[in-house]
Amino acid sequence: MVDTAQRGTDKRKRFKLPALRWWMFGFFIVVMIINYVDRASLSIAMPLISKDMHIDPAVQGIVLSSFAWTYALMQLPGGWLVDKLKPRRVVSGSLIGWGIAEALTGLASGIASLVGMRMILGVFEGPVQNGANSSLTRWLRKDERARGSTLVDGGGPLGTALGGLLVTGLIVSLGTWRLAFGAVGLITVLIGIAAWLFMRDDPSKHPLITDAEKDYLAAEQHEATEERKGTALRYFKSRSTWLLLAAFLGYDAVVYGLLTWAPTYISQAQHVSFGLTGIWTFVIFGVGFVGEVFAGQLADRLIRAGAHPNKVLRWMLGGAGVGVTIAIICVNYATSVAAAVFLISAANFFLRWGGLFWSVPARIAHAGDVGKISGAMNFSGNLAGIFTPIAIGLIVSATSSYNGVFIMFAIAGLIMAVASVGIRYNVRIGADPTEQSA
């Protein structure tokens, strides 16, 4: 009888072992979902807003780009804030701040106020993904981080997909896009309060963690106390750092292009009703979420099975860039709405393998510098976020066509592919003297 009871206890312990850290990252998925719901809300409502405010495509591009102006500028100080203040304070404060900005967007009376609210939104959203990525080094072991990074980043396409349904549904049910923005902002503030209550920066201090899970995570905690050598500037003497920035720039150029213009392309170029646009948006970005989760699972399984991390990440990220290029260029030859949505969805499936990029800073940087390198990477990507929506608006305004847009996306996919295969994913910069000049 005692043996039976003991076996039952052991089974429960084994079951609980991964529970809290994956609940924590499940919560980060929720954070990233609402991050992208708020970020994509303007893109989804833009067909209606552009009619209300008489905004032409060129100006739409500027409005859609304005979020990235401040979001990009917040990446480097945001990474510093995460390392200094720790993720709990930064993430919860950011959520509350951008929830208020999202709600106030519904009061915008013209282009200037619309741009202003989007810029404030960018300031508060800026540090959040750096905070999530920094937590990755505390809450997951090295062989779980590809899954963790893609699950968290996967909240992006999932949030955009759900946002397509949520924002469209709120606009239809409330009768105006203005009230819809207020409702989404309130939800964001409530999640910010939940973040403060649930998050902990040190896993061992979380009231719900078990002794078994503390021991499990402690096996790699030496990374956090490893002696640091030099300043964060040393990373920029490495070829891998610069290639990571280039690869993420190519990746984010397509991410922002689809995020900001896909609903308008479907609505206007493919002549789809506003309600159906929300459904097609859900399909495109839902497929992207599936691709991201698939990539994370595959990468971790291959690495655990003995495959070299360098080969796994080079092949997967390089191949993803090629897949994006082929699928997206074919959109120009689509002859129906279904064909166009299928090809864009296929491109987004491969594109979101780029969520693996978020596991790279923890591989090449000291644990105390992960937030800074994540911030630098995201800053590079969001430079594309500034210029891509504007470039699309200018191309569409000048040519009355999206053909040039998809050619631009294909070039970005090639940049992502070429840069990805040159990164040394298995070398922590500073640990190997040859990497400083490699």
Image: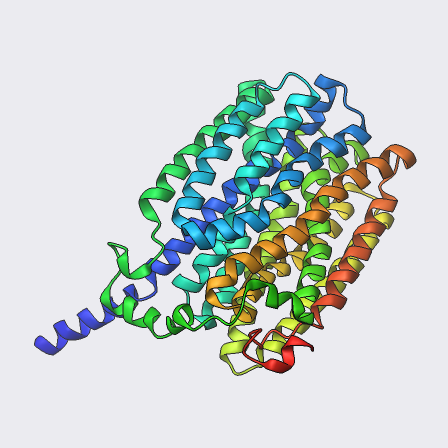
Question: Residue 251 location in percent, x, y?
Answer: 70, 56
The quadrant the N terminus occupies is bottom left
In depth, the one of 57 and 383 nearer the eye is 383
Question: Residue 198 location in percent, x, y?
Answer: 33, 47
Q: Is residue 162 visible?
A: no
> Relative to 328, is 20 on the left or the right?
left
Which residue is pictured at 43% across the width and 39% down the height? Answer: 93
> Relative to 354, is 296 on the left or the right?
left
> Relative to 40, is 204 on the left or the right?
left
The relative height of residue 15 versus residue 105 in the rendered view (above or below) is below
Farthest residue in the left direction?
1
Question: Residue 148 location in percent, x, y?
Answer: 48, 61
In depth, the one of 414 and 180 nearer the eye is 414
The relative height of residue 330 versus residue 9 in the rendered view (above or below) is above
Which residue is pictured at 63% across the width and 47% down the height? Answer: 285
The quadrant the C terminus occupies is bottom right
Place residue 350 in its image quadrant: bottom right
